[in-house]
Every structure is written in C-alpha cells, then in structure tokens.
Image (spheres, rainbow, N blue to C red):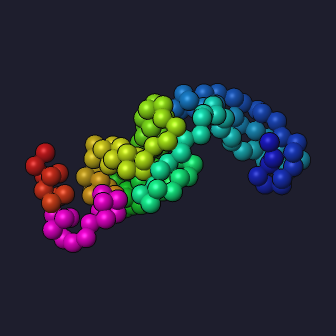
Amino acid sequence: MKCPFCSSDNTRVIDSRPADDNNSIRRRRMCDVCKKRFTTYEKVETIPLIVIKKDNNREQFDRSKIEAGILRACHKRPISVNKINKLVDDIETEIFNMEEKEIPSTVIGEIVMDKLKGLEAVAYVRFASVYREFKDVNTFMDELKKILDK
C-alpha cells in the first residue's frame, strides 16, 4: 500500500479491526519513511454490477454517484454524516442483494428515494425533483401532496 503523503511503498499495518458496517476491515497503517499514519478499508470484491442508464448506455456501478446525489439532497439539512453513510451502505447492500448482473438506473433511483423518504422529507423532495425531472410547479406540488397525505 502506497503512503498517501510521500508515495512510499514501505507501509505497515498497525491495527486491524472490522469497520462499522461489518462488511469491511479497517486498517491503520504507518509509513516507514515519513512516519505518518493513515487508514485504509478492505472490502470483499463482488461481481461487477452494470447499471443500465436511461439512454440504454451501460456503465459500472459507482457507489460515489449515489453518495454525491444524497449529499446534494441533504445539503444544509440536520442529517449527520453517519446517517448518510449508513443510508448509502443500506442502499448498496439492497442493490447487491438483488443478485443481478445488470440493473436499470431507475430501480436504483427508486431505492434511493424510498430510503430518503424514511430519513428526511426535504431531502427526499430535493432528490425526487432532480431524479423525476419535475417540469413544472404542479408536478412538484403533486409529489409534496403525496408526502403530506402519508
């Protein structure tokens, strides 16, 4: 493992333990050259999941895209980083538990919206407004009414 500070290959593991999600291992490492410490995470490599986009293009599943969308939706909302990370972990677990090799982006979007709805209403509406591409205020209001009716 290369040191992120000095790019040396001489690093060693100081501590190793299960990460919070119990699906990965957290390792504390120290560089033998610059003596700085850093953390790495080791995960089981899964079968590559292909996402089928709206235009029928295919690309490899990228967790960071889900994370970025949720972070934008939760911007300036009272939601902790831990809750956001757990939400992304839950979404990723649900997607991989489907055991599909290809999954439409629409299915992923619906899973994200379902999880956000349970977390925070404003974040849900923000995400839905971008995901569903609301064309006008009436469409936006219809979605708000659905939330208020529940």
* On-image quarter of the N terminus: top right
Is residue 135 a member of the stretch shown in magenta? Answer: yes
Q: Does 3 appear above or below 99?
A: below
Residue 26, by quadrant, is: top right
User: In the rendered image, is residue 95 in sight?
Assistant: yes
Magenta highlight: main SS:
helix
Q: Residue 96 at x, y = what percent?
A: 49, 34
Q: Residue 117 at x, y = what percent?
A: 27, 47
Front residue (pair 84, 65): 65
Front residue (pair 16, 107): 107
Q: Seen in the image, is 127 located left or right of residue 145?
A: right
- Residue at the image position 64 percent from the left and 27 percent from the top: 17
Q: Seen in the image, is 105 located left or right of residue 146?
A: right
Q: Does 96 appear above or below 84?
A: above
- Residue at the image position 81 percent from the left and 47 percent from the top: 2
Residue 133, by quadrant, is: bottom left
- Residue at the image position 53 percent from the left and 53 percent from the top: 58
Front residue (pair 25, 35): 25
Q: Seen from this angle, which residue lies furthest front?
A: 56
Q: Residue 130 at x, y = what percent?
A: 34, 63
Range covered by the magenta-colored residues = 128-141
* On-image quarter of the C terminus: top left
- Residue at the image position 20 percent from the left and 64 percent from the top: 140
Q: Seen from this angle, which residue lies furthest bottom?
A: 136
Is residue 104 a member of the stretch shown in magenta? Answer: no
Q: Seen in the image, is 111 located left or right of residue 52?
A: left
Residue 37, by quadrant, is: top right
